[in-house]
Image (spheres, rainbow, N blue to C red):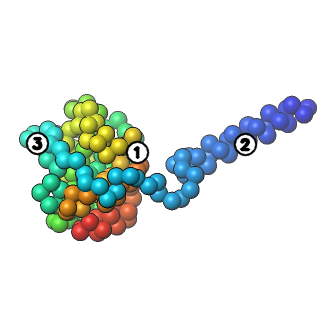
Amino acid sequence: MMFVSLGIGTTIAVALIVVVSLLTGGRSSSAPPSNALIGTEASTFSLPGLSGGAVTAPYAKGHPTALVFMASYCAPCRAELPHLVSYLHAHPTSSVRVIGVDSSDQRAAARAFVRHDGVPFPVAYDLNSTVASSFQLQAIPDTVFIDAKGRVANIVIGKITPAQFAHDLAAIGG
């Protein structure tokens, strides 16, 4: 009987750990993780655009920029993107450039993904995740905010809320 009680107790403890982990996004505190890149100069890029042409890092020309890293296969990205699109339609920004970076995706799936949500900003096609790697991003979605001097102002790991997006846009001049 004692072994049955221990088994039930262990099962309950493991279930609680899983639930807490899911609710906190796997983080042990509510403080955002720090990133060593904040305050450093962002590396520039030029990638093919999903709609043709090239997409080049606008911060290289003095424009504050929000980089939204995403992919069609990413469930959190599919949940996040419609909220960002709605926010940008309601709050157009002319002083901050917003650029999507579709990472490690199939080109046709990526095009359908951004077309489905009516993405109003250019999206770079980063087949090998070279840009994501330059920002030391391990998974998506992530959003990187870069000021007009080309310095990383903030990196939001995971889904971003419209309120956080607005806050970080304002911080870089939006």
Image coordinates of residue 57 in percent, x first then y, are 17, 50
- Rendered residue at 58%/46% (across/down): 21
Disc 1 and disc 2: Cα gap in Å?
A: 27 Å
Instruction: Report the disc number at residue 105.
Output: none
Residue under label 3, please give it. 54
Residue under label 1, please give it. 76
N-term-proximal mark, 1 vs 3: 3
Disc 3 and disc 2: Cα gap in Å?
A: 52 Å
Q: 18 and 80: which one is in front?
A: 18
* Residue type at tag 1: Pro
* Residue type at tag 3: Ala
Q: 67 and 43: which one is in front?
A: 43
* Residue type at tag 2: Ala
Residue under label 2, please give it. 13
The residue carrying pointer 1 sits among few (fewer than 14), some (14 to 19) or many (20 or more) residues within 10 Å by Cα, namely: some
- Rendered residue at 29%/33% (across/down): 104
N-term-proximal mark, 3 vs 2: 2
Please indicate whether residue 52 sits to the left or right of residue 41 in the image: left
Quadrant of the image occupied by residue 123: top left
